[in-house]
Image (cartoon, rainbow, N blue to C red):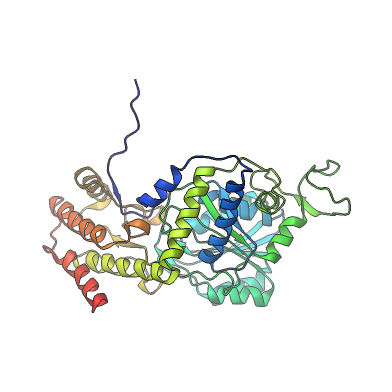
Amino acid sequence: MTSEIAPPPRLLMGPGPITCDPRVLRAMGTQLVGQYDPFMTATMNETMALYRGVFATANEQTFVVDGTARAGIEAALVSLLEPGDRVLVPVFGRFGHLLTEIASRCGAEVHTVEVPWGQAVPPEMVEEAIVRVRPKLVACVQGDTSTTICQPLDDIGRICREQGVLLYVDCTASLGGNPFETDAWGVSVVTAGLQKCLGGPSGAAPISVSDEAAALIRSRKRVEAGIRDARDDDEDDVRTGSVIASNYFDLAMVMDYWGPRRLNHHTEATSMLYAARECARLLLEEGVENVVARHRLHGDAMAAGLAATGLALFGDQTHKMTNVVAVEIPERLGAAGGDAVRTRLLEDYGIEIGTSFGPLHGRVWRVGTMGYNARKDAVLVTLAALEQALRTAGVPVPSGEGTAAALAVYARAAA
């Protein structure tokens, strides 16, 4: 007979998901109510208001898409793009390629500007491509965990505004741990997930849509020509363009669901709504700037400790995400040895770190300090365990230097 589920104790110090904040788990265990219970609709309204603070926006259309972070990405792109639209994607890691794939599935004409993994895309490259391609949309990742690089967005947002181009940003891996200014940077649509710096589980995708982008989305047809959508009670309402190819990810319908009309679209994932609300509440309670500073402190301590252990940091450190760092796997280990060290960390110490994808697979480890795990004890325990795992694998490492270097970062911050 199958027993009650009992996951082993783990300290998740990879690129995500991370160890869930216990307060978020408690919120998820709260009892369900009906979909149109006053408590439910009030909770939805509270969640919208909280995420306006998280995203630093006044956008009315700020809510949660039910599904993983990728559901938010797909909802944004399938609702914004029509077949033949030109899209420009700055690519500096795996998730830029993901945006390219999803935009292509929407029938868009996709153009890219690419830099080697480990670098950020210079804004002048984006500007030149915008002038040359004349896209409807620029779609960009802020923090790409495959490379641990954080793409600066303020100049790209300014360029998009000057050129009359919409800007979509996926900040799944960076929101909460790195500065993000939706309105100040001119971001048209932004989506995220809970399982990184927000300290929650995967399964809900916060989103914010500007008035301009919302109007464009609402202008799209919802059904095939000649079939009236029962939710449309305004006979003068005229929509143009192609039908949005998804029902579930049709943001026009989802906005009606979250809006004052509460038009039925799907059954809200209530427990995930509670989780999303608690993630945002905790972040704002601590203060956005304080949360970013906490991620920066523990990220700096982890990076210093890894370097002192003798591991080479990967990529342009001036554009490194605060919440995850990549290090080169020692050559003497090779790819198989790198996986063996990760396995030893997991089996002997219950600690998980990540490998990477594509050209970096087997070349780097990715070590995260995010959300609930952006704390001193998690950093020090991980560094001590990794040092021992490396020594066991035959890699000569200086004894205690990693934790000492991390402690020095904390001492300077406290001085």
When the figure is inspected, residue 294 is found, relative to residue 9, above or below; the finding is: below
Q: Residue at x 49, y 52 (%)?
A: 276
Q: Residue furthest bottom?
A: 415
Residue 68 is at least partly visible in this image: no
Q: Quadrant of residue 279?
A: bottom left
Quadrant (top left/top right/bottom left/bottom right) for the N terminus: top left
Quadrant (top left/top right/bottom left/bottom right) for the C terminus: bottom left
Q: Position of residue 192 (x, y in %)?
A: 51, 57
Q: Position of residue 226 (x, y in %)?
A: 86, 42
Q: Residue at x 67, y 69 (%)?
A: 165
Q: Residue furthest top?
A: 1
Viewer-proximal residue, 340 or 155? 155
Q: Residue furthest left?
A: 399
Viewer-proximal residue, 391 or 275? 275
Left or right of 68 in this view: 257: right
Viewer-proximal residue, 176 or 335? 176
Q: Position of residue 55 (x, y in %)?
A: 53, 65
Q: Position of residue 264 (x, y in %)?
A: 69, 43
